Amino acid sequence: EVATRLQALAPVASVEQVASVILCLGERGFSSSSFSEAVSTFSSKADLSPLAPTTLLQLAVASTKAPSLAAVVGAVARAVSNSPKAWPTSDLVRLLLALAKAKGALNADDKRQLLQRAAKDITPELGALPTSDLVKLVLAIAGDGESQLIVAAADEALGNRISGFPQAQLLILTQGLIQALGASHDLVQKAVDFWVELLLEMTRGGDDDDEVTKRRRELEMRSRLTADQLVQLARVAGVGGANSKLTEQIGNQLLAAGR
């Protein structure tokens, strides 16, 4: 009955009104084959570009939680790609992260066009993007392989901010970059080299350190990786002969953690 009413509403109501009904039902967990079919029909025919960015983002996030809304993902991606409306950068990152979770629901052409639009809007703003959003961006697009956007994000993260990352965040960032670029990429090797220096620095120290250095070292020790995270770092970085220095430093940290 709900799906029948939705199908009757679609031709006479605005796209904003229909989207609002779909979003409301989806967020409440309503699910049926007829509802999914109605959403699919609406998504294939309607132009969602008049919708506000907040509504498009809500639809994308809801689609990752409600299987009945899976068909709306492509319509959201097309609307964002074709709309001249400016998106807040953080919201665009959240959208990319949501769509990355909608595995299989977004076709290759829609994804490609969306990534092109995202690269155009996000790249100039990378320097102002909060660190947490920078990590989310890498995670959102890592599965799509090497692109201008992820290379630009890696340049920002590794060139301008790497020393400010908490180790747990740096681990996630490293994992995303390896997934997208491969372990042999120059930017990934830059991250690996930093890990070597960071872990080596944590084993150093002495009474002759000045107060600033001692304080920094204390903060690093508090935020250092757990043993499980160190093992994860070893796994994602593919340590071995090519990364013997990292292997050594991870081993030292594991030994220290076991004392």
Image: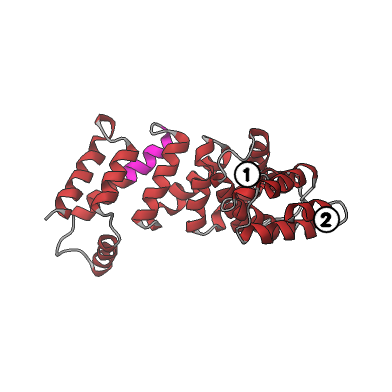
Q: Position of residue 128 (x, y in %)?
A: 56, 58
Q: Position of residue 32 (x, y in %)?
A: 65, 50
Tell me: residue 122, above or below residue 239: below
Q: 8 left or right of 147?
A: right
The magenta stretch is 185-194
Tell me: residue 57, above or below residue 113: below
Q: Which kind of residue does numbered mark 1 sit on?
A: Ala
Q: 44 left or right of 197?
A: right
Q: Is residue 50 visible?
A: no
Mark 2 is surrounded, within 10 Å at the Cα level, by few (under 14), some (14 to 19) or many (20 or more) other residues, namely: some
Q: Residue at x 55, y 45 (%)?
A: 100
Q: Secondary structure at mark 2?
A: helix
Q: Which kind of residue does numbered mark 2 sit on?
A: Leu
Residue that numbered label 1 is attached to: 119
Q: In the rendered image, which quarter is residue 243 located in? A: top left
From the viewer's side, name the closer residue of 181 and 108: 108
Where does the N terminus fall, quadrant-wise? bottom right
Residue that numbered label 2 is attached to: 9
Residue that protrudes farthest toward the bottom in the picture? 211
Q: Main secondary structure of the magenta part?
A: helix
Q: Is residue 187 magenta?
A: yes
Mark 1 is surrounded, within 10 Å at the Cα level, by few (under 14), some (14 to 19) or many (20 or more) other residues, namely: some
**Does the residue at mark 1 contact the one at mark 2 (Cβ under 8 Å)?**
no
Q: Secondary structure at mark 1?
A: helix
